[in-house]
Image (cartoon, grey):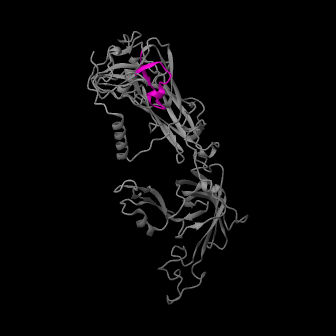
Amino acid sequence: MKIPPTAPRKSPARRRALVFLLGWLLGAVPQEAQAQWVQQQIVLKPGWNAVFLEVVPTPDDGDTLFAGLPVESVWDWNRTADSAQFVQDPNTLIPGASGWLTWFPPGHPLAGQANLFALRDGRPYLIKLADDAPVTTWTVVGQPSLRGIRWRAGAVNLVGFHVATNPTPTFATLFAGEAGLAGQPVYRLGSGGAWEPIANLASTGPQPGEAYWVRCAGPVTRSATFEVHPGSRRGLVFDPGTTEQSLRLRNTSASHRKIFLRRLPSATPPPGQPPLAGPAPLEYRAADYAQAQVDWQPLTNTLTFAALAPGAEWNVQLAVRRSELPSSPPGAVFQSILEATDDAGTRWLIPVTVEPASRPASLQASSAFAGLWIGEAVINKVSQPAHAGDPLLARPAGGEFQFRLIIHVDAAGTARLLQHVFLIRKPATLKPDPGNPGLNIVDEPARTVVVTDERLIPGIAGASAVVGRRASSAAFGFSQPLAFAGGAFGNGTMTRSVPLDYEDPLNPFKHVYHPDHNNLDERFEGTLPEGREAFTVTRVLSLEFTATDPWGLNPPGWGDTELGGTYRETMDGLHRSTIHLGGNFRLVRVSRAAALNQ
């Protein structure tokens, strides 16, 4: 049989140079630490083995991965080759032949010809053990792979499958409905070391960790009977600013599928990786649309979708209640694995990372809520000054009135009430690179600035065409931020007096074009004193934060990115008696910028 040709090989130095150049062109994206660890155990027998790597090996170099094992060589098929043939007998493989990348152990006579520098996840490999070696278990530690199959139409593909051990899907089940795969020949590496066709695809299926040659007659995009889409190849990553994530599971088969989802523990991270702080404390959104009820529940049991139609998706909303995260050692992260399986036997493992929020110790505890908060106050109670009982008691109103609240909290924990705010994207600034004359490096990265003075926007946004977004509250008319007094933001009761001068254009008693409400004398020359035609209106706001959501929504971000509680207000100047208002309020953090106008 023909040996598949390959693209020209590159030396290690040239390869490293190309990787560096690609990283520079793409913006020098840094490598991120892996997490959510599993151990894939692959049984290697003497002679040839066709294996499928289901994890991101860490480390990934062959010298470390195969240290202490009787491995003579490792072969990686270069899928960029043009040939549609495969090697019937692996013993005919020639080191350096086109179509294959090869690794040899240190000290091997052919080690200098090795061109396989790193093993990758979601890849098939041919591994040759010494003929007199015992059966050996190869344990690979890494992050679960979410890489699907990229089929080459009109060719024989060396592939592996993400499957469970019980049940195991048959090849007929996996390929049903795919014209390019259904009925096409599949080859398995036999005990004698040669590739053998599988006689009955309806009764035989792939095994975990094993690779096969599969002929693909036409275009195919399917990787399994169902696919998972966590939004990132790293899985579900809850960084300090993320509370909720969406996991989509799509049925790619031709039949209805029963889908299962459960949480599994993470293995111990390898040396050099972030330590394990504990399992990821996930919650899921449980929705009963018939009863119009939505709630968040801890993910402790297996979730099931009974009959997912072909082509349909199951969108599982997952979240982390950060306010209840246990304390963890510095640098540690919460890690778990989500196992998604179906009734056919497909199995995916999704990594889950929850990064605790890290805050400088120099900041006060209240600065944990630093940033811009925007929400609503809902008034549903009002006093009745003419009531024969208690005229100061706020009583349930016939309806609700709501208005916007905008609050900024600085690094010291001081909260300020805002009437308006601009969220401006400040572009990155550059500076000359000391080591490379003529080149610039980033001095300050781009960031979002919270601005209360519109005149500062040109100096912050520069020549940006889109400078930002504006939010305001029609319930207030002051121009400068007003600091709250009293308890701490997020845990206590804050108060603030908001006066509206009798001469203010927004005062409800004043009217420019009405002689009885313009605060001017009969000759329209002198200003009348307060109380003649208009009155100063003084509002005193009181925000009492509560441990539970006053709206009963129980969001996972409560206590971290969402806060609220009881709203109270007194109003003087509109009536001869003080008017008392009551209700509740909710706030959502939209920015963590701890400074205004900077």
Out of 340 and 333, give the one closest to the viewer: 333
Q: Quadrant of the N terminus?
A: top left
Q: Which residue is depicted at the point 36% across and 10% down? A: 199
Q: Nearer the viewer, residue 347 or 535?
A: 347
Above or below: residue 464 compared with residue 201: below
- Count of number-bearing discs: 0
- Residue 345 place in picture, x, y as percent: 47, 21
- Res 219 → quadrant: top left
Residue at 60% over, 32% down? 300
Picture quadrant where residue 458 is located: bottom left
Where is 56 relative to 465, above or below?
above
Residue 285 falls inside the magenta stretch: no
Q: Residue at x 58, y 58 (%)?
A: 377
Spot occupied by residue 591 in the image (x, y as percentages of width and height)? 51, 55
Q: Is residue 166 visible?
A: no
Was residue 68 drawn as part of the magenta stretch in this picture? Answer: yes
Farthest right residue in view? 389
475 vs 187, left or right, is right
Left/right of residue 179 with respect to residue 31 in the rendered view: left
Q: Is residue 566 visible?
A: yes
Taking depth in this image into account, of 48 and 191 the one nearest to the observer is 48
Q: From the top left corner, tell me how far across and down residue 429 is, in percent.
A: 41, 59
Q: Which residues are magenta?
A: 48-73
Q: Is residue 52 above or below residue 477?
A: above
Left or right: 430, with 378 as reference point = left
The image position of residue 356, as x and y in percent, is 58, 45
